[in-house]
Image (cartoon, grey):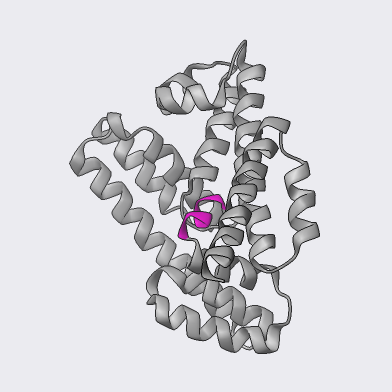
Amino acid sequence: MNTGSVFSYIRQINASKMTLPGLRAIEDKVLMKMSAVSAVGGQAIFAAIEEQRGLLKKREIVRLQGGGTTAEVTKLYLNQNVLAPSEIEEKIAVLRGVAGRNQLLERLEFQSVEPLAHEFDPDSPESTFRSRLESVAREIRETDSVEPYKEYLSPEQQEAIGGKGGPEGVAHAVETYTESLSAQVDAAQAFYFGRMQEGMRKLARLPEDVQQTIAAKFSAEIMQGVEEQVNGG
């Protein structure tokens, strides 16, 4: 990536109408093209992204002032990457008492327990594994080419996804893979909060082989628990 391209990215980042989702899309693209970005260029781009993201978050937090419990949950969500884990836990505990069942708060609480779940957060202001896969699928369709699949994903990821055929088939495979992983995270979150039926419904959307793998893990964990009770009795 030459100097002109770096400046082009920075101009996009600092555009007056930039939004958090738009900024994440740029971050996704740059992260996927890191092999073509110089150390100095990458440093400049990510510094600009962080500065702009901070400004956009502050603007949104100001807009949310006085907006009630839901607004407080959103403010915590936006600030999570600058707060210590203990602070997040304290704020979650306070908000849980007044917010009732709040989808965003539950997601935040689950991510505090299982940090990997953040990589599948559809609303994250930051680039995630999920958003990068979605960007790959989108670029495959936009370019009508499988080159983004070959260029941006590792051989191990390509093998796991199993994309075959033309651009549409490969894009669909990437989307199916992304949806499968996301559904597993959603199911795990439902189980964590004790909503077993909801978790099972989410698992039912997965391919049969994935369901069987998860069922085998659950079975092993159940039997391990029984064994512990027997040995301890």
Question: Residue 91: x percent and y percent?
Answer: 52, 84
Q: Position of residue 133 (x, y in %)?
A: 53, 36
Asked whether the viewer can see residue 214, the reply is yes
User: For residue 119: magenta?
Assistant: yes
Residue 215's place in the image compared with 126, above or below, is: above
In which image quadrant can residue 102 be found?
A: bottom right
Residue at the image point whose x is 64% and y is 83% from the top: 96
Q: Residue 123 is drawn in which quadrant? A: bottom right
Is 152 placed left or right of 5 in the picture? right
- The percent coordinates of residue 79 (x first, y second) are 46, 73
Query: How many marks overall?
Result: 0
The residue at the far top in this view is 165
The rendered magenta stretch, by its main secondary structure, is classed as helix
What residue is at 61 percent from the left and 60 percent from the top?
226
Residue 162 falls within the magenta-colored stretch: no
Q: Nearer the viewer, residue 191 or 135?
A: 191
Where's the N terminus, which quadrant? top left
Residue 162 lies, with reference to residue 129, above or below; the image says: above
Q: Quadrant of the C terminus?
A: bottom right
Report the magenta residues as a range: 115-120
Front residue of 69/176: it is 176
Which residue is painted at 38% across and 42% down in the image?
Answer: 9
User: Would you say 154 lies left or right of 186 here?
Assistant: left
| Residue at the (73%, 76%) spot, across then down | 101
